[in-house]
Image: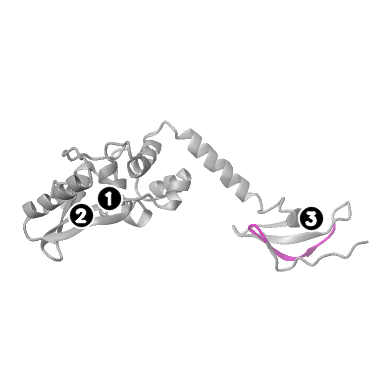
Amino acid sequence: MSKIIDLTGQKFGRLTVIKRATNNHKGNARWHCQCDCGKEKIIVGLSLRNNNTQSCGCLASEKTCKRNITHGNTHTRIFKIWQGIHTRCTNKNCSSYCDYGGRGIRVCQEWTQDFFAFYQWAMSNGYSDELTIDRIDNNGNYEPKNCRWVTRHQQYSNKRNNTDFVGVSFCTERKGFVAYLKIDGKYVLHKRFKIKDDAVKARLKAEQQFGIKIQRKEKIYNE
């Protein structure tokens, strides 16, 4: 009989081996394990070492749930919102790209890789069909700490600090207007002015210098 390898204390996926259990009917060594979710289960040692079993079963359930949620929501409003924030941040052919991806706005990695993560955040933070997704800091990224669900009126009030001009925002702390432009994640313009018209002129000059065309019409992009 081969020597049994002591797996006590080792971790395999979500499972931590607590102690030895009785062999199964074939004489294979089994181990008493605790899953990260809190459940306990007795598992054959070979199955652990070969990574055939990595949880008490909760991992497979989560994967199934993710697939069902994704495929069951592909035609829903919330899925279109998720697609929309990615499109305007990554697709240079999108009409609103200059206002988002063009000035360095990104979608966090968690939401980029997983619609399920975005869905869970949305459902836990007040999502409803009457509300739109809004970035608290209009110069910040789409990420949990910077996003919320608000009415269209609230979103418009927050948009660009309500200066009504893309690339110019009002800085309350310094009591002035900031003209800014980001290309490939880097500022090519970020300058403060006392007068709004001066900030607007600086922004327009930068757009002309770098060959950027923007349709001057404020919109609310939520779907």
Q: Is residue 140 visible?
A: no
Of the two numbered discs 2 and 3 on the same chain, state the one appearing first in sequence.
3
Is the C-beta separation of discs 1 and 2 under 8 Å? Answer: yes
How many numbered circles are shown?
A: 3
Q: Which mark is residue 24?
A: none
| Residue type, label 2 | Tyr
Residue at the (74%, 61%) spot, across then down: 32
Residue at the (65%, 57%) spot, across then down: 13
| Residue type, label 3 | Leu
**Residue nearest the observer in this picture, 179 or 49:** 179
**Position in image of residue 18 (x %, y %):** 71, 66
Which residue does the numbered mark 2 point to in the structure image? 180
Residue at the (18%, 37%) spot, across then down: 215
Q: Nearer the viewer, mark 2 or mark 3?
A: 2
Is the C-beta separation of discs 2 and 3 under 8 Å? Answer: no
Image quarter where the C terminus lies is: top left
Which residue does the numbered mark 1 point to in the structure image? 103
Q: Nearer the viewer, mark 1 or mark 3?
A: 1
Of the two numbered discs 1 and 3 on the same chain, state the one appearing first in sequence.
3
**Position in image of residue 154 (x %, y %):** 20, 47
Q: Along the horizontal axis of the image, is 113 left or right of 198?
A: right
**Residue nearest the observer in this picture, 5 or 8:** 5
Of the two numbered discs 1 and 2 on the same chain, state the one appearing first in sequence.
1
**Residue nearest the observer in this picture, 64 or 49:** 49
Range shown magenta: 12-23
**Counting other residues with Cα less than 10 Å from the Cα at mark 3, is it few (<14), some (14-19), or many (20 or more)?**
some
Examine the rendered structure and indicate whether residue 217 appears above or below residue 100: above
Which residue does the numbered mark 3 point to in the structure image? 46
* Secondary element at tag 2: strand
| Residue type, label 1 | Arg
- Which secondary structure class fits the magenta region best? strand
